[in-house]
Amino acid sequence: MTNVQFTKVWKKLDLYGGCENLFDFRQIRPIINWQNPFGDYFDTAFAWGPTRGRELYVGVRMRL
């Protein structure tokens, strides 16, 4: 996964924004046979990658 964040700093205020999972990579069907959790092929060990897509965020920090 590739993450990026940018920050603009002033004397008492910071403004930041960023993106997690920049290239929107997702593992397709990380849990095999998820419909049958008590079956022979239900295995969570095959979940090796991210399951959520790209996420954007912004925020503000203030110094008192």
Image (cartoon, helix red, strand yellow):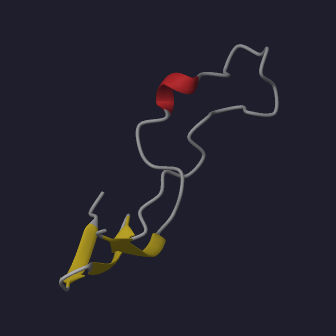
User: Could you tell me residue 14's position as x and y percent?
Assistant: 28, 78
Determine the residue positioned at 51% across, 64% down: 53
Q: Is residue 43 above or below residue 55?
A: above
* Residue drawn 60% across the image and 46% down it: 29
Q: Residue furthest front?
A: 64
62 vs 50: above or below: below
At 77% across and 16% down in the image, what residue appears? 39
Residue 19: percent from the left, percent from the top?
Answer: 37, 72
Task: Check the image and report above or below for 52 versus 8.
Answer: above
Q: Quadrant of residue 52?
A: bottom right
Q: Is residue 4 left or right of residue 52?
A: left
Q: Residue at x 81, y 33 (%)?
A: 35
Query: Is the N terminus in the top left, top right, bottom left or bottom right quadrant?
Result: bottom left
Q: Is residue 41 left or right of residue 11?
A: right
Count of numbered tags:
0
- In which quadrant of the rendered image does the C terminus lie? bottom left
Task: Locate residue 39 relative to residue 11 in the image: left or right.
Answer: right
Q: Is residue 36 left or right of residue 51?
A: right
Residue 21 x/y as whole percent: 38, 64
Residues 27 and 53: in front is 53
| Front one among 3 and 57 | 57
Q: In which image quadrant can residue 62 be found? A: bottom left
